[in-house]
Image: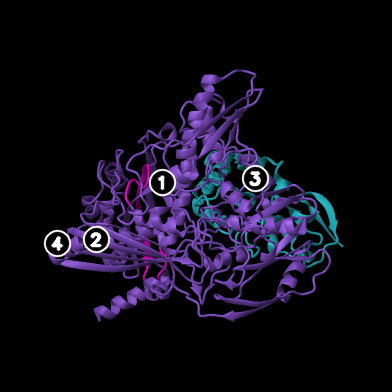
Amino acid sequence: MIKFTLNGRTVETDAPATARLLDLLRDEFELIGTKEGCGEGECGACSVFVNNLLQNSCLIPIGSIAGADIQTIEGIIETEQFKILDESYSIAGGVQCGYCIPGMIMASAALLSKNPHPSEDEIREGISGNLCRCTGYNMIVEAINLAAKKGDGLW
Amino acid sequence: MNLKNISTSVPKKDHKGKVSGQLPYISDVKVENMVYGVLYRSPIAYGKIISIQLPTLPEGYEAVGAEHIPGPNYVKIIKEDQPIFANEWVNYIGEPILMLTGKDLDILYSLLNEVKVEFEEHQAIYTLDEAIKQKSVSSVLANYEFGESLENISAIEQGAHQIIEEEYDTGYQEHVYLEPQGMLAVYKDDEIIVQGSMQCLYYIKNALLSALACGDDEVRVVQSPTGGGFGGKEDYPSMMACHVAVAARAVKKSVMLVFDRSEDMLVTTKRHPAKLKYRTALDKEGNILSMCVDIFLDGGANVGLSSVVLQRALINSAGVYKIPHFHAKGYVLKTNTVPNGAFRGFGAPQSFAGIESHIGHLSKLAKIDPLEYKRKYLVKQGDPTITKGKFRDPILVEEMIEDVLNVSEYKKKKEDFQRLNQQNQRYKKGIGTSLFLHGCGFTGSGERDHIKATVKLVKSKDDQVSLKISNSDMGQGILTTLCKIVAKELDLPFEDILYPYPDTKEVPDSGPTVASRTTMIVGKLLERAAKKLKNQWQTGVEQEIVEHYVHREMIPWDEKTFTGDAYPAYSWGVNIVEVEVDTLTGNIKLEKVYGNYEVGKVIDERIMKGQIDGGLAQGLAYGYLEKMTSKQGRIQQKSISDYGPPTSLDVVSIESKVFDNPYADGPYGAKGAGELTLIGGAPAVQAAIEDALQTSFQQIPITPEVIIESLWMKEGEEG
């Protein structure tokens, strides 16, 4: 039995310790916002926070998360920070097919909480682990820049 | 919000569901009594199946193969050459032979390892070069030839000052849509519902009607939110749909087939590798007297859509130029490799990379700046096309070039870079251009003879208007743009127009979501339907308006002679790219990218900008970053990082502008836009690298290895 915190609630699972956190979130907890794009830690579509650090959930065996604090996109939807990112992504046109977007939002939030006023280069660096095939990234970079301005003081 | 100006951006219809991650893609769906399917695929490139030995299957696990297909064993696309499950022969590594179904994927994969198939292996053809050499014996899957007679051209060549011959190679390109392919067949006693990630609902429905040999009301196709397509979900989903539907019928359960990334990269269609040969006669001053182009496409093991891809490649073989005496021919050749298919641009990116490269090299011989040389040959309104069609509408390319020259300070930079490069031994800067067009809509008579699109608008009693069309939003934004067209026509708030994910039970066949046709063709039909609805509007009454495609006959297309108007309209583009090349490592850094486009009329500025940035990122990467190879019939790159699509660190901000030039047969004047944006990337990046290194390349992608090799060769030559 593995016990951990998921989006603010204490939860437990009987799944084997070698199961991927990604599968646990999607199958057992039905949190579909965490997407699988590659299964090898290369695309960032499955990004979650593990103890406030951005991680690819496809690379995490659940044996390693006992006692950890896990947050998925569902866990941040109600926050002010998410609302700012949501609006900024809409204004900047950062969303096309949408498959990378929950992971990209997690990466954006992670970046801004570390660095509330990132430069363009720092934004590009901050989302470089998250692949997007539709946008060519520029409108996402612009969205994060906008969120930094709109959410000044929030992060 | 009522729309004043059609081009003004609005919030996208699907934004909320996507940004929160709560919009369910096919892999997010679970239905009752659902099992998974996994495919046993051929480990050899060419051979005969001698025997198949299955392991003992636990309860609830079953095997499905060719014997379970009620109809003929092929995926209905164009020709009947692609089996659903290999029958007797296998033609490429990865060809599906049978499917195992059951509840647990881990158990399925371990069972898959225990399947034993005995083959009699035969000599395969692995590469396009081998296929070209053996052309007489290997099968030509498609070929066309057109243009001025070779006798005339040979007479011109005899009087020419010199004849330049070049060979140019382009590689595979992999789509890397972020959502891997997935398809689910929901089993019901009287109906199979196939839902999944797709671009073309009726392609799939027709394939299913054939494979299941069933009645029209026994099968239904529903699009799930689709995480990127780029052509990769044009033809391949038909095969997956046949797999899950045949399996669902056989095991009487719902069957889900979702690829992981490596399976997706190894077995799904890709952009055709191509070889393009140019033979051009020049006079003393370097002016073009005549040109012959030969195009060879690697079709892979089945023809699929390759014949149509070849048509588009050929139609674009002279680029945006009026070449005095022109002849072209092309072949799709069979190799024992993964079948190649549709990819944004559909044959045009190969042709434009080739012709822009060749014309650039000719300009060097004539000692004229490449852009200046290209401008001498630019087509003008009223000029014939190379297929004896006509460029009917105004062409703004000259204006677009002038503008981007000013914005980019092209001339000044050319001089600055020359000076800088003399001072800096290691880092060299270069600037390059590309000029391109894209024929909008289906090639040739496709819209008139094959697609015959129909759209429907339905108004409910409470006056809610819904779009009933079979087109897929795969990220390009048609849920938003098409609703805008209808909203503006009806003078209703954009938010009030509904466009549910299409279901063939509800929607007529408005055609596939391909060929930059959706906005122009389907959008125009919707505009007409909305106009009609407005005229007939009765508040509180259910109403339905149906509109059919009407072909505006120009110069009729004849596929046999390869003559006539290949497209009703053309969109245009100009790119300028600046790079810095590290001559020590061969690394290329993009520095600046500019793009001017003309797509008739923009339906949503922000969505257009998204198409420009995204298409250009793919096009640029096609030229220098993305490399996929096959060895002994096996694709060598099976992970994203093996392949190398651009990350946020590879792209720079793109300065772009869109020119207004409304087209009479497009909604609000709109033409196609989605594919155009990819086409100019690779040739501009090649020209910039050539400018930096003062050398010529005969291939894309120009990877660091290619650059280092060329620098060594140059050093060798210079002694």
**Highlighted range, magenta:** B563-588
Q: Which numbered disc flags the more N-terminal residue, 3 or 2?
A: 3
The residue that label 3 is drawn on is B216
The Cα atoms of the two marked residues, 3 and 4, are separated by 62 Å
Q: Which numbered disc flags the more N-terminal residue, 3 or 4?
A: 3
Judged by depth in the image, the label closer to the viewer, 4 or 2, is 2
The residue that label 2 is drawn on is B291
The answer to whether residue A114 is visible is no
| Chain that bears disc 4 | B
| Chain that bears disc 1 | B
Judged by depth in the image, the label closer to the viewer, 3 or 1, is 3
The residue that label 4 is drawn on is B283
Q: Splitting the image into 4 quarters, where does residue B52 fall? A: bottom right
The residue that label 1 is drawn on is B445
Answer above or below: position of B589 versus B46: above
The Cα atoms of the two marked residues, 1 and 4, are separated by 38 Å
| Residue at 51% across, 20% down | B535
Q: Which numbered disc flags the more N-terminal residue, 2 or 1?
A: 2
The answer to whether residue B207 is visible is yes
